[in-house]
Every structure is written in structure tokens, then in C-alpha cells.
Image (spheres, rainbow, N blue to C red):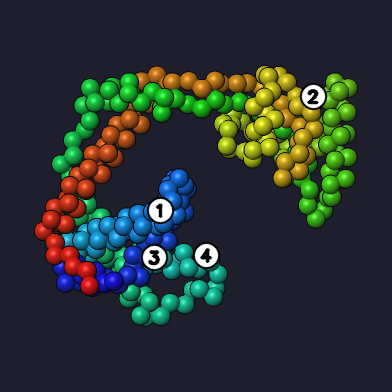
Amino acid sequence: MTLTINGQKIEDLAIQQEAERLRPDYERVFTELPPEDREKQLLEWSRENVIERVLINQQAKKTGKPIPDSELEAALTKVKKQYLSKGPETVALSIEEQTKIKKDIEMHIKVEQLLAEVCKDISEPSKDDILNFYNENKEQLKSAEQIKVSHIVKHMNWQIDQAAANNVIEKAQNELKQGALFEVLAAKYSDCPDNGGDLGFITRGQMVEEFDDVVFNLDVGEISDIFRTRFGFHIAKVYDRKPAAIPPFEEVKDQIVEKLKEQMRREAIEHFVDRLKSEAKIEET
């Protein structure tokens, strides 16, 4: 199947490539759909994305102002530096490649200018809108439970095997039982000794699951037994705990403003794209 959008032919490969770009997130969200229906919907969404992107690019090319060559060259230099960071084998770019990259950069800048123009008249959210959002989304704004935790960790690697790592962590545990300070032993034995092994305040999901399962079940001041994660052996101590809580309005006001403005930007762009679609000639062959 070939799409023709205002006379520009778009091969089916473009839709397939968009589908592969969307697939990881899409399949994670729509796991309950039957595979056949899931694939059909994914392709439909990919097709719509391609159409919208082409229409925006066409409009940007039509209405965009010329981009100074000095600006394009500066952007190309940044791209070259990115290539350089990946290794010397990727540094050499042919004249044709550089020309294509500059065209892509030019299009990207023109699209940004076009969308900025579309959104230029967006106003600041009203105080009532901000407050209503806060009242209606308190659960989403709620901060996660946090704990302040330190650990003594002994990694297993090519330098130290399981038995040797376990021996070190057991020495630390024995000294703890004899009254030694946790922070002193972290500096003495841990592979992460800075600040007494302090990890600061963490929320669930920041560390590996095996770590969370232990530390989030400790009381303040409590020290764990030796436990193991994929990184090695640990002993952890919890110093403080902040329960999940709804933040005060003033604390999240700026965050809400940005959310509402982003929502208005999306809506403005959606209306603009809908207008482009209504005026476009889109054919399938």
C-alpha cells in the first residue's frame, strides 16, 4: 500500500518503521487486546502518525523562513561531535551525508518554528484552573513514600568471588553486633564507602527489587540482616521515613501550570493538524 498526501508518495515502509518505534510502549500498555486486534490498531495509529508528520513537514516547508547557513553549520558541528563520541570509525561523513543531515536539521528547525507559531497565543492558566487541577488530581500529585537509607555493600566480580565477599560482609555484621558504628563500618568495609554508605532518600523502584523488599520493611533506626541482590551482599540501615503525602498547593503550583500549558499546547497542535487533514488530499493505492 502506498499513501499519497498532497501529491507526496509515502511508502508502506514508513508506516512499518513507525509501528516498530511505537511497539515497545504500545504492547506494554495494551497487553489485554488479542494479538490480531493489537497489531491492527498499532498499524492504524502508526499510519495516522505518519500522515500527521508529513502534513506538518509540508506546512513547515511551505511557510517556514529560510534558515541561515551559519545556524545549520553550527548544528551540523554538534552532530559531528556526537559521532566523534561514538568512536573514530563513525567520524567520517561524506558530503552527501552532511547535505542530508543539514536538510533534516533545517526541516526540524522549521517544524519547531511552525509549532511555536501555532502555540503563540496560548494564555497562562487561570488561578481557578490551577486550583481545580490540584483538587481533582491530588492522588496523582501525591509524593511516594521515601526512606533515608545507608548500606554496606560488597560486590562480587572478577576480583572477589562469592565466598570472599560473604566473608567480608560477615565481618562487618559481627562488628555491628559488638557495638561498632554502622557509618564507621561502611567506610571500612563497603565498596560504596562515601558518607557512611549514605544513599539519601529513596523511593520504591530507584533500587533493585531485592533491595527495596528489605529496606522498605525496616523501621527507623533498624539494621537489616545480611541480604543479597544481583550486585552482591548488603547490610542496610534506615535513618528516616517520609510517608506518601499530598503536597501543599503552593509546592506544586508551578508544576501544575506547566502541565496545563503543555495540555493547551497539545490541544492547539491537535486542532491545527485536524485542519491540515481536512484540507489535505490523502489517497491510498
Disc 1 target residue: 38
- Neighbour tally class for label 2: few under 14, some 14-19, many 20 plus, Cα within 10 Å: few
What residue type is disc 2 on?
Leu
Residue 71, compared with residue 231, is above or below; it is below
Query: Which label's residue is closer to the chain start, 1 or 4?
Result: 1
Question: Cβ–Cβ below 8 Å for labels 2 and 3?
Answer: no
Q: Residue at x 51, y 27 (%)?
A: 144
Which quarter of the rendered picture does the C terminus lie within?
bottom left
Which quarter of the rendered picture does the N terminus lie within?
bottom left
Viewer-side label of 2, 3: 3
What residue type is disc 3 on?
Gln
Give how far apart the Cα atoms at labels 2 and 1 are: 57 Å
Whole-percent x and y of residue 136?
32, 23
| Secondary element type, mark 4 | helix
Query: Which label's residue is closer to the chain start, 2 or 1?
Result: 1
- Neighbour tally class for label 4: few under 14, some 14-19, many 20 plus, Cα within 10 Å: few
- Neighbour tally class for label 3: few under 14, some 14-19, many 20 plus, Cα within 10 Å: few
What residue type is disc 1 on?
Arg
Query: Which label's residue is closer to the chain start, 4 or 3?
Result: 3
| Secondary element type, mark 1 | helix
| Secondary element type, mark 3 | helix
Q: Residue at x 24, y 58 (%)?
A: 52
Query: Which label's residue is closer to the chain start, 2 or 4?
Result: 4
Disc 3 target residue: 17
Give how far apart the Cα atoms at labels 1 and 4 are: 39 Å
Q: Which mark is residue 181?
A: 2
Give how far apart the Cα atoms at labels 4 and 3 are: 26 Å
Q: Residue at x 18, y 68 (%)?
A: 283
Query: Which label's residue is closer to the chain start, 2 or 3?
Result: 3
